[in-house]
Amino acid sequence: MDLESTPLNTLLDTLVDKGLRREPPTREEALAVLTASDDDLLDVVAAAGKVRRHWFGRRVKLNYLVNLKSGLCPEDCSYCSQRLGSRAEILKYTWLKPDQASEAAAAGVAGGAKRVCLVASGRGPTDRDVDRVSETVAAIKERHTGVEVCACLGLLSDGQAERLRAAGTDAYNHNLNTSEATYGEITTTHTYADRVDTVRKAHAAGLSACSGLIAGMGESDEDLVDVVFALRELDPDSVPVNFLIPMAGTPLAAEWHLTPQRCLRILAMTRFVCPDAEVRIAGGREVHLRTLQPLALHLANSVFLGDYLTSEGQAGRADLEMIADAGFEVEGADEVTLPAHRADGAGQARTDLVAVRRRGAGTDLAPNA
């Protein structure tokens, strides 16, 4: 197909047809989605929405983050407020005890979350850390039968994924974040290949793999297409799409290049490339999508509820109202998220939009859920 002479509606019809058949677009087609004009935005959203509804209906899965250990990380990831050398004035605390983590998770479950994501800063877990997390998983599942638990602990060593699985962990998150070609520009203390290896370890251990990206770090359209196609090849069940939260005190604090329209095109491209994966609107949606967040629900079938690791999110009640007002419904605990074939197998800085988390885990204040 000569994309330069192809009408956009024809291209979108082709992408919908491919998405319904789980066939990937070409790189050129994916790039064309990213470069579509703002005038054509609603057409792009409507087309990708057809693919989303085919595989996931109007269900929205709610996920809830618990930051088990905040700050003090030895890695130098430029986007992260917990990084080595960060001057961000975030909460810093060592490991939550299992009962503290379970209490934090309870707030999210009460708000409708069916998956709890346990995150800890650091390069990767020690064997003692795996024991801690295993105890926490047990405490959460004892209190909330049926809740899904995802761990995000950094790079895994041999055998650790199997131990987490045996302890009842359902999923493991480790994002690729950006393209292999540009990875060294944002992180020097580990490699892109290290991240790929950890996702494969999770897969091999029978954990549901979760791996996504961060947009807004100065990457090109080609970089975004590269990382999303790399994710498709790794075949994670869930693909979180994060939008950089430019935290004061981090190297990328001045990276305010995203618009709500570009964020929607990124989500649409991700949906076309990964049509039957759980695409999650993750960190930064409030900061960059702003009032267009409801449109993103036509592209993604999963969101984080409440606050993030070190920054505040939209109030949980506001999330639930947004989902209902947009004509979607919260996915129930007894519903299977994935389709059967998977279940069986540039802008001006808006620092006013970035608020450091001061409630929930690691504090004495009630969480936002």
Image: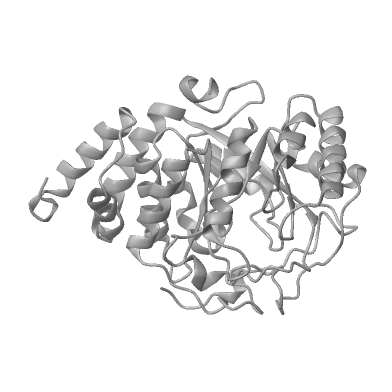
Residue at 58% over, 44% down: 199
Residue at (18, 44) in percent of width and height: 11
Picture quadrant of residue 253: bottom right
State the image quarter where residue 63 is shown: top right
The x and y percentages for residue 96 are: 88, 52
Q: Is residue 57 visible?
A: no
Q: Is residue 173 left or right of residue 133?
A: left
Residue 251 lies left or right of residue 213; in this view the side is right
Q: Can residue 203 be seen here? A: yes
Q: Residue at x 81, y 54 (%)?
A: 360
Question: Is residue 94 depicted above or below 240 in this figure?
Answer: below
Front residue (pair 145, 251): 251
Residue 349 rendering spot, x and y as whole percentages: 51, 78
Q: Nearer the viewer, residue 162 or 342?
A: 162
The residue depicted at 90 percent of the width and 47 percent of the height is: 100
Q: Which image quadrant: the N terminus?
A: top left
Residue 117: which quarter of the image?
top right
Residue 203 appears at what percent x and percent y?
A: 58, 36
Left or right placement of residue 126 versus residue 284 in this view = right
In depth, the one of 221 and 188 nearer the eye is: 188
Q: Position of residue 74 (x, y in %)?
A: 73, 69
